[in-house]
Amino acid sequence: MTLTKNTEILRAEVAAHIKADALVRGSYWKPGKNAVGGQGCFISCLTHSNDPTPAFERFGLPVAVLRIAENIFEALPAAEGRAFFAALPDAVGRDGKDLSRVHWGFLAAELRALPQKTDAAEAVIDPVIDGMDLLFSGQQWAAAYAAYAAAYAAADAADARLRQRDTLLALIAAA
């Protein structure tokens, strides 16, 4: 387990990148002549590269959390993306936090937020949410339970592929 560290340095670097207007969407780190030496996306402003590993090593920010943050950042309007990046140090708050399970909580929350689902879809998704909740809380997701959920997910995916196949063939035939 790696705990958050160097939070004050993180706070200073995020502020410096915001002040230098170095945060841009759609681009990994590009060297430049501004106060921070270039510009780039969420991850690259923390690492000056396209690799999130240095941010994990330097600040204790898990790679999975950084990848999720990067994805959210890229989808936000520019001003909201900057505000999201600027909010990171305050969310981390202090040295010594264990963020290693945050991605499980995030994924469970996203599954809960899916639009209205059919009973069949809920029967597949709900056990996955339960498993992610267990992982987020630091408990084990039993292998049998995971296999059960995976089997239902695979069956649902197979049904979707068959439906997609039939739809495409019907559209081709009708053209």
Image (cartoon, rainbow, N blue to C red):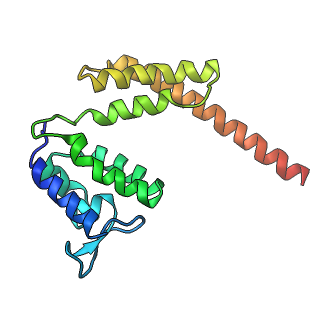
Q: Is residue 145 left or right of residue 37?
A: right
Residue 41 percent location from the top left of the image: 34, 63
Residue 100 percent location from the top left of the image: 22, 36
- Count of residue discs: 0
On screen, 133 above or below 66?
above
Please tell me which residue is depicted at 42% across the width and 53% down the height of the picture: 80
Q: Is residue 111 left or right of residue 140?
A: right
Please tell me which residue is depicted at 23% across the width and 23% down the height of the picture: 138
On screen, 152 above or below 63?
above
Please tell me which residue is depicted at 63% across the width and 18% down the height of the picture: 119
Assign the C terminus to one quadrant of the image: bottom right
Please tell me which residue is depicted at 10% across the width and 45% down the height of the picture: 5
Residue 65 percent location from the top left of the image: 30, 44
Q: Nearer the viewer, residue 6 or 131?
A: 6
Q: Nearer the viewer, residue 23 or 47?
A: 23
Q: Nearer the viewer, residue 86 or 67?
A: 86
Q: Is residue 165 left or right of residue 131?
A: right
